[in-house]
Amino acid sequence: MAVLKGPHICTVILILWTFFFLHQSWLVSNGSYADLWQNCSEGVSSTWNCLSSSNNEWLQSVQAMMILSIIFSVLSLFLFFCQLFTLTKGGRFYLTGIFQLLAGLCVVAGASIFTVRHTEWHRDPASFGYAYILAWVAFPLAIISGIIYVILRKRE
């Protein structure tokens, strides 16, 4: 069971990191970065000037997908602990696995939308930031742990 919780907890941390922590850059260009909530550029005397992100529908859908992935992943972890104590011997963690698979699908949907549409939002030549890359790393971790949960049987 300890091996299984590792990828799940890593997935939760990665998803939270890509979405909520400060200076989570999804796009990086000369002296500025952009995340899902704000665009920041370096001003005079190394201060950051941050403006709210645009209200594009696609950006709001990326935000919604990432929020849903966090909800599904945390719910899946909670369900795992509930099922760990209530499931009969030999039972499978179907519900936990389904919610973890949904979290992975939400991450890939949000990251895919961002990949396709980011040029409409930030026209300057920019490269993808570390939070964007962490979102793509969280996707296979969530899918793999979801599949493992579906296959896993409870032991004594």
Image: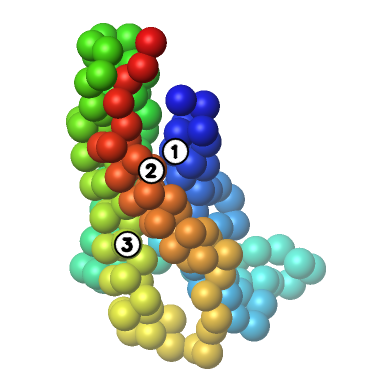
Residue type of the residue flagged with mark 1: His
Residue 79 vs residue 113, the one in the foreground: 79
Residue type of the residue flagged with mark 2: Ser
For the residue labelled by badge 1, is the local secondary structure a helix, a strand or a loop? Answer: helix
Which one is earlier in the sequence, the residue at label 3 or at label 1? 1
Residue 67 vs residue 154, the one in the foreground: 154
Instruction: Please say if 155 is above or below 99.
Output: above
Residue 108 is marked as 3
The residue sitting at 37% across, 76% down in the picture is 115
Distance between the alpha carbons at the discs numbered 2 and 1: 6 Å
What residue did someone put label 1 on?
8
Residue 32 is situated, as x and y percent measured from the top left of the image, at 60, 74
What residue did someone put label 2 on?
145
Instruction: Please say if 145 is above or below 76.
Output: below
Residue 86 is situated, as x and y percent measured from the top left of the image, at 26, 9
Q: Which callout, 2 or 1, points to the residue nearer the camera?
A: 2
Q: Which callout, 2 or 3, points to the residue nearer the camera?
A: 2
Q: Quadrant of the C terminus?
A: top left
Q: Quadrant of residue 138?
A: bottom left
Distance between the alpha carbons at the discs numbered 2 and 3: 15 Å
Residues at marks 2 and 1 touching, judged by CB atoms closer than 8 Å: yes
Q: Quadrant of residue 150?
A: top left
The residue sitting at 44% across, 63% down in the picture is 136
The residue sitting at 26% across, 55% down in the picture is 105
Residue type of the residue flagged with mark 3: Val
Residue 115 vs residue 92, the one in the foreground: 92
Residue 70 appearing in the image: no
Which one is earlier in the sequence, the residue at label 2 or at label 1? 1
The residue sitting at 30% across, 66% down in the picture is 59
Distance between the alpha carbons at the discs numbered 3 and 1: 16 Å
